[in-house]
Image (spheres, rainbow, N blue to C red):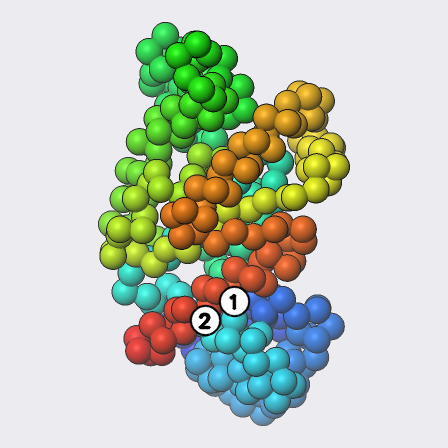
Amino acid sequence: MTDVRKDGNSHPFSKGLLATSLSITGLPLEERYEIVREIERELDRVAVVHSKEIQQRVQQKLQERGFKREERFYRVTRQLSELEKPLFILLGGPAGIGKSTLSVELAHRLDINRIVETDTVREIMRNMVSAELVPSLYRSSFNADETVKADLVDDPLIYGFNQQVDVVSTGIKPVIDRGVEEGVNSIVDGVHVVPGYLGMADRDDCHVFQYVLEVPDKAEHARRFQSRANASNRNAKRYIANLEDIRTLQEYIVEQGATNGATIIVNESVDQTIERIMDDVTTELEPQVASSA
């Protein structure tokens, strides 16, 4: 039995834990377990090993197999908790685009424990502010125009949406500030994550990666609402009935993303989108973790 030492503590070597840590790479399960089995054989007669040595062995196995990008994913993400400044990944886009699914998968791959959903922030604010005072809070993003007098503005849909985003952003900013203060890596997702509203481009106290997701195909967008409804209590018909307005908001959010320096991603595949974001994060932060090692 091999004991693994880390931070003054020890625990028995676990193939399952090591294979789970390798999920960061995105490699198939069989490929991960082949690497784990090789390391287990190498440690067969080793009584005590430090966790960093196991990480080095994993990195060597990945390099030997030609998995250079996966090796970077593994090496960099294992050190994200040691960054001097916290990491924030912002995911914006209209309803039904796959933001929540992507957030959960990214959190797993990047070992991030805090996900902030803007719909949750809006729900909390609803319990603090009355509908009479801020009526846009009590509408969905695609029908906030119901609170707008159409004869006073050129585009009630965008105007009502902007009002809602502006209000919800006042609730999101303190959450981000607290995360920075605590040094907690976080993912913030939601339709209200519109580039230009949160002032993240001007911050130098955290690492920020801002993305806007889109689905260009209308039929595919509608299908996702049905898929989401099958796994939750959300009524797909309500969203599909408002699909034109939702897609108008998509165009607007994409435009704001392009204007404010966000990365626009066509979210056709969760796996491909995750690989893209993982590539961005690990490539940019690799020098940071190397200098702190």
Residue name at image x 57 percent, y 74 percent: 70
Amino acid carrying mark 2 in the image: Thr
Instruction: Give whichever of 140, 102 is nearer the camera.
Output: 140
Instruction: Give whichever of 151, 25 is nearer the camera.
Output: 151
Q: Quadrant of residue 136?
A: top left
Q: Quadrant of residue 162?
A: top left
Is disc 2 placed on a helix, strand or loop? helix
For label 2, count other residues whose C-alpha is less than 10 Å away and answer few (under 14), some (14-19) or many (20+). Answer: some
For label 1, count other residues whose C-alpha is less than 10 Å away and answer few (under 14), some (14-19) or many (20+). Answer: some
Q: Which mark is residue 125?
A: none
Q: Which residue is mark 2?
A: 283
Q: Looking at the picture, does residue 88 appear above or below residue 194? A: below
Residue name at image x 47 percent, y 21 percent: 155
Q: Are marks 1 and 2 in contact (CB under 8 Å)?
A: yes
Task: Quarter of the image for the N terminus: give it.
Answer: bottom right
Q: Which residue is mark 1?
A: 279
Q: Quadrant of residue 275?
A: bottom right
Is disc 1 placed on a helix, strand or loop? helix
Q: Looking at the picture, does residue 208 appear above or below residue 247? A: below
The picture places residue 38, in percent across and down from the top left corner, at 66, 85
User: Left or right: 27 with respect to 158?
Assistant: right
Amino acid carrying mark 1 in the image: Asp
Mark pair 1, 2: CA separation = 6 Å
Task: Quarter of the image for the C terminus: give it.
Answer: bottom left
The picture places residue 126, in percent across and down from the top left corner, at 40, 19
Residue name at image x 52 percent, y 71 percent: 73
The picture places residue 114, in percent across and down from the top left corner, at 43, 47
